[in-house]
Image: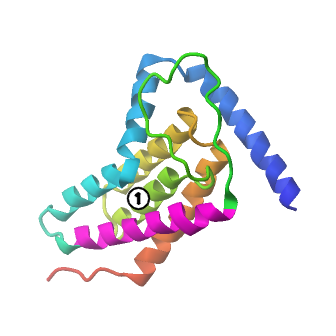
Amino acid sequence: MLAGARKAAGRLDDAVETRLERVRGHRIADRVFYSASELGEWALIWHLLALLQGILPDRDPMSVVRFSTIAVIEGALVNGPIKLLFRRTRPEWTREDPRPHHLRLPRTSSFPSGHASAAFCSAVVLSGGGDPLWPLYFAVAAVVATSRAYVRIHHASDVLGGALLGVALGLLANHLWVPYPIG
């Protein structure tokens, strides 16, 4: 069974890599995906969105603390014990020229993608309670997650695994820590 999963992941990785290679090097695509990857570092974009959400009228400012606590726990779990279980090598940068934009190159396992997990966990948590901006959160999550395969820091299967893990952790967090409504 494990061998079959590895083969399927390899096929997915190869298919996505072929498609991404067609777009890499385009100025706008490079800027979008490298910027998204950079904004995903330390869940920066998600903390900013949570802060903006927390200062809106009729919102509980303590929701920012709730979000940040959940994000820190998610990041510690994914980038600590969960990545230690897998120890997958990262994709190699095969081009002779340097990356078009500087990025921090992590030393941890490639599986699962911490950016993808943080992105989708954050989208789920920020969307909790029926926030009307939920499509925006998930669109940003998709771009941040995809950026990791685009910049060749993760395989596509790492991103998919991270996204699924992030959704599960976000749903669990929303279930365990239901915010109290204002009023």
Q: Is residue 147 above or below residue 115?
A: above
Q: Looking at the rendering, which quadrant does residue 81 occupy? A: bottom right
Please count the marks in the image. Answer: 1
The amino acid pointed to by label 1 is Ala
Q: Secondary structure at mark 1?
A: helix
Residue 34 position within the rendered picture, expressed as x and y whole percent measured from the top left: 43, 32
Q: Residue at x 59, y 43 (%)?
A: 154
Query: In front: 89, or 46?
Result: 89
Is any part of residue 63 visible from this angle? yes
Is 78 part of what is drawn in magenta?
A: yes
Q: Is residue 153 left or right of residue 29?
A: right
Q: Is residue 63 left or right of residue 159?
A: left
Region rendered in magenta = 63-85
Q: Residue at x 32, y 49 (%)?
A: 45
Q: Looking at the rendering, which quadrant does residue 16 occupy? A: top right
Question: Which residue is farthest front?
Answer: 107
Residue 117 position within the rendered picture, expressed as x and y whole percent measured from the top left: 51, 58
**Pointer 1: what residue?**
123
Q: Is residue 14 left or right of residue 42?
A: right
- Locate the N terminus by quadrant: bottom right
Q: Residue at x 61, y 53 (%)?
A: 109
Residue 121 position within the rendered picture, expressed as x and y whole percent measured from the top left: 45, 62
- Locate the C terminus by quadrant: bottom left
Q: Residues within 10 Å of mark 1 (few under 14, many from 20)?
A: many
Is any part of residue 60 visible from this angle? no
Q: Looking at the rendering, which quadrant does residue 132 occupy? A: bottom left
Residue 83 position within the rendered picture, expressed as x and y whole percent measured from the top left: 60, 61
Q: Is residue 136 above or below residue 123?
A: above
